[in-house]
Image (cartoon, helix red, strand yellow):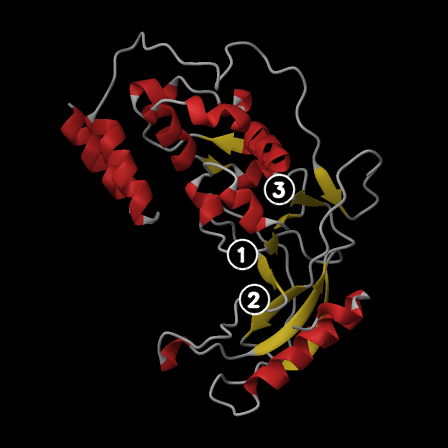
Amino acid sequence: MWQSELAEATIALGKKLLPSVQNAWHGLSGLMEEGAELPAVFKSKAIQGLPEISIEGAGADVSGLEAAAKTVDTHVSASANLTLRDINPGIDWKPKGLWASDKLAWVPREGPISPTDVVRGFAYHVDTSGARIFNVASRDNLQSLIQRYGKLSEFPSRTEAKISLSDIDLGKLHGASEPELRAFRNSDINWSEMAKNFDGIKVSDYQRIRGAGPIPSWFDGLDMNSSVTWNNVGKVKITPLGKVPSFYDPAFQEKLNALVARAGEIQGIPSAGR
């Protein structure tokens, strides 16, 4: 029976990262007993209030909420005349939308892997101050996001299926069992449900959050401080910065730093350049 489930899971998860597929295989081939007891990391009763969310933008009441870390959001497009439109974020582990990184971080400074990896296009400063953004600036914010919009993988094992992400406590993951950690790491976010309440999401302290304990694969795949907005029209402002220089341009660093500095000035952070 489990062989057919494994085959279905492998096909369904084919678009995910290889570690996610491997973990799903272990979960399906190592089914545990129905009566397995779960430790306190996943509480059996309703949680007593959720951690606060750090929210940016659009008239949000931010009194008492954690201040969002300052990032300089920049996007690179093949188009010199980028226009925005609303889009459904979809159901994949990485939502669709207008992606931006902090200070053009997606443009490699130390050199591309190969000439085909050279970033080409036009840089834009992205202003999301008019949008309602879910800001992940701490592990508490990440926990709140998972509790509210988290979902298990499509084919959880019997033990994993008992786990409620709405009751998760990231502070107790060190005591979790392997099936629980596997379920947590393979979990996703219901982006379409989240889009009913938010225009996008920003991660403004990625490295610290990632280094403080276990994280889901979808979060690990973000790689850096970044943001994505899906409800864009009328809520997100983009300002052209200029053409992204080729890494092989002798003045690459100088030109790239100039773009970053200009983005910081637009945002009111003159020291944004590297």
Are the residues at dot 3 and dot 1 in contact (C-beta closer than 8 Å)?
no
- Vertical comparison of 204 with 184: above or below: below
Measured as percent of width and height from the top left, residue 163 is found at 43, 20
Question: Residue shown at 54%/27% (left/top)?
Answer: 171
Tag 3 and tag 2, C-beta contact below 8 Å: no
Badge 2: residue crowd in 10 Å (few <14, some 14–19, many ≥20): some
Task: Give the mark count.
Answer: 3
Dot 3, crowdedness within 10 Å: few (<14), some or many (≥20)?
A: some
What amino acid is found at the position of numbered circle 1 in the picture?
Answer: Met
* Label 1 residue SS: loop
Q: Are marks 1 and 2 in contact (CB under 8 Å)?
A: yes
Q: Quadrant of the C terminus?
A: bottom right
Indicate left or right for 60 with 213 as reference: right
- The image quarter containing residue 252 is bottom right
Give, as a three-letter code, the residue at label 3: Ala
- Label at residue 195: 3
Residue 254 in the image: above or below residue 229 = below
- 3D distance between C-alphas at marks 3 and 2: 26 Å
| Quadrant of the frame with the N terminus | top left
Query: Does label 3 or label 1 sit earlier along the sequence?
Result: 3
For the residue marked with disc 2, what is the amino acid? Ala
Say which label, 1 or 2, has the lower sequence index: 2
- Which residue position is annotated with label 2? 105
Residue 56 point in image, percent of width and height: 75, 46
Q: Which residue is mark 1?
A: 224
At a point 62% along the width and 42% down the height, the residue shown is 195
Residue at 39%, 29% (x, y): give it.
181
Q: Is residue 77 visible to us here?
A: yes
- Name, please, the residue furthest toward the top: 35
